[in-house]
Amino acid sequence: MTPARPHLVWDWNGTLLNDLSLVVAATNAAFASVGGPVVTSDEHRVRFRRPVADYYAEVLGEAVDDEAFGRLDKIFHDAYRDGLTTCELADDATAAMAAWPGSQSLLSMWFHDELVPTVHTYGLAGRFTRVDGLRATVGGGPKAESLRRHLAELNVAGGAVVLIGDSIDDAEAAESVGGRAVLYTGGFTDPGRLRASGHPVADTLTEAVRLATTLD
């Protein structure tokens, strides 16, 4: 049954996990492999979007088909894995999760088989009723379909969901199931872009949880 109070779905990369610097470094490794430019963190936050292939095409100045994206995606993830042990949780991630009064789960677009042990490494497994990552060999697509499957497994109606994430794609995924979103400025997206979206925006995760508790 759907819980009486909203169910909270957390995003992982760029939200609970503070991995922006690593993501930008891994992105630049992918771009360097084809002679592309170097992007700064600020540039990445302004330009990044899903599908990620569209972002890559814009930066590289040429179309990125499925085959080319598959190669770039592999380079990105190899570089990301190499640096993952350097990443920490967002400063107030633990306090924010503890502040939520209802059930909560985790949905990431990172590979499921790598996500689950990583969540255990950070001591968070017991926080969530369910943890789901990408069950595919190549990522980069929108989150909406993954969110639908995640909620179906939880037996939670979309209208009973609040998603906290750091991207416009997170908000669009929540809207696609009839849910709501609070967007966090500490991740992969420029704060101005988030505020222009019209969704509630928070500068800290604890503030995001507070806003989530006020949504009807």
Image (cartoon, grey):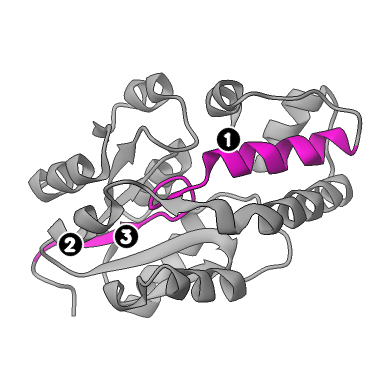
Residue sitting at 81 percent across and 46 percent down? 72
Tell me the tag on residue 124.
none
Q: Hey, what amino acid is under mark 1?
A: Arg
User: At numbered mark 1, what does the secondary structure look like: helix, strand or loop?
Assistant: loop
Residue named by callout 3:
9
Residue lying at 60% horizontally and 28% vertically, measured from the top left? 44
Highlighted magenta segment, given as a residue range: 5-33
Callouts 1 and 2 close, C-beta under 8 Å:
no
Q: Which residue is mark 1?
A: 49
Residue placed most toward the observer, 161 or 92: 92
Residue at image position (70%, 57%) is 82
Mark 1 or mark 2, which has the lower sequence index?
A: 1
In the rendered structure, are the residues bearing label 1 and label 3 in contact, judged by CB atoms less than 8 Å apart? no
Q: Give the image quarter of residue 191.
A: top left
Placement of the N terminus among the 4 image quadrants: bottom left
Q: Which of the two marks, 2 or 3, is nearer to us in this view?
A: 2
Mark 2, Cα crowd under 10 Å, few <14 / some 14-19 / many 20+, is: few
Would you name the residue on which mark 2 appears? 98
Q: Is residue 200 left or right of residue 44?
A: left
Image point 17% across, 62% down: which residue?
98
99 left or right, relative to 108? left
* Viewer-nearest residue: 7 or 33: 33
Could you tell me how far apart the alpha carbons at marks 2 and 3 are, in whole angstroms? Answer: 14 Å
Q: Quadrant of residue 38?
A: top right
Q: How many marks?
A: 3
Instruction: From this view, report whether residue 75 is shown above or below residue 182.
Output: below
Q: Is residue 177 left or right of residue 2?
A: right
